[in-house]
Amino acid sequence: MSVLGKGSGSSVKMPVITIDGPSGSGKGTICQKLAEALGFHLLDSGALYRLTAVAATEQGVDLADQAAVAQVARQLDVQFKSSEKGVLAFLSGRDVSRDIRLEEAGMGASKVAAYPEVREALLDRQRAFEQQPGLIADGRDMGTTVFPDAPVKIFLTASAEERARRRYQQLLERGESANLRALLEDIQARDTKDMQRSASPLKPAEDVIEVDSTSMPIEEVLNLVLKVVSERIKLSV
Ligand code: C5P
């Protein structure tokens, strides 16, 4: 198990590694591998927005009604459990891991994520993941808003075409049908929405390290991030 290096005096700075970037940049895979390699906790903040959208839809709440959606976010009964298949998400005890990965849940998440009241409602829930021995935080505003003091901040990107291609491949591997052009349009629409909203838009933090994964194999990205982590955080493994 990894143990955190001590800060000055009695205060111990928690090693939080934020990985922000657009959909399909490889954040999810990198974050999971990093959490495994370092023995850290993992926050998939996108899943919280997806869960909010799915729960609201199930409860018959209009996604255009900010106050009502924020109320759903405040009352979310969510549990995450590690399994061989990765992290499973439960809503009021029901496994919704598959439902929240559907394209419509992604679009719903992007819609509710633009509401400041919803972002506020999910803030403490996200910060509660900051626990010893450390945290890998995956999202859009991890380094800018949720964990601004994180010692390591990465902004992971890839071209929209490459991200659409990865998503296309992923869907085919799952035995689902997919249309590359539609996926590219969906990714571009989501990018625009995430970057142009006024509440915590997707943008690199000032002290971030940008990594373009367009033509980098996942192992190479992982090694690069691990190198940065070892330079910035004193870990005794
Ligand atoms: O990362 P993922 O694709 O699961 O996120 C779904 C949506 O949730 C994103 O398109 C984005 O609109 C929103 N999101 C966000 N802030 C985060 C994580 C996700 O706005 N920290």
Image (cartoon, rainbow, N blue to C red):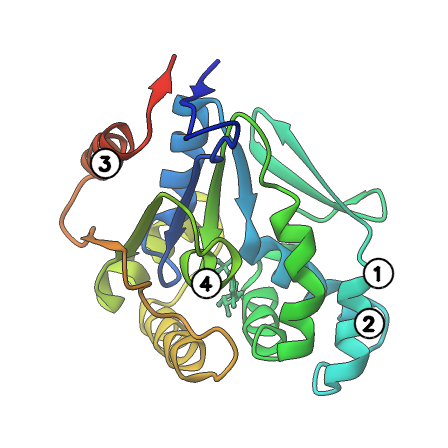
For residue 86, say whether it is visible.
Answer: yes
Precedes in sequence: disc 1 or disc 4: 1
Tag shown at residue 172: none
Q: CA distance from mark 2 to mark 4?
A: 21 Å
Which kind of residue does numbered mark 3 sit on? Val
Precedes in sequence: disc 3 or disc 2: 2
Residue at 29%, 60% (x, y): give it. 163
Report which residue position mark 1 lands on: 75
Report which residue position mark 2 lands on: 71
Label 4, secondary structure: give it: loop
Report which residue position mark 3 lands on: 228
The reply to whether discs 2 and 1 touch (Cβ–Cβ < 8 Å) is yes
Which kind of residue does numbered mark 1 sit on? Gln
Which kind of residue does numbered mark 4 sit on? Asp
Which kind of residue does numbered mark 2 sit on? Gln
Q: Tell me where residue 135 appears, x and y as whole percent.
A: 50, 37
User: Horizontal placement of 198 versus 116: left or right?
Assistant: left
Q: CA distance from mark 3 to mark 4?
A: 20 Å
Report which residue position mark 4 lands on: 141
Q: CA distance from mark 2 to mark 1?
A: 6 Å
Label 1, secondary structure: give it: loop
Which residue of the protein is positioned furthest toward the bottom in this rendering? Answer: 64
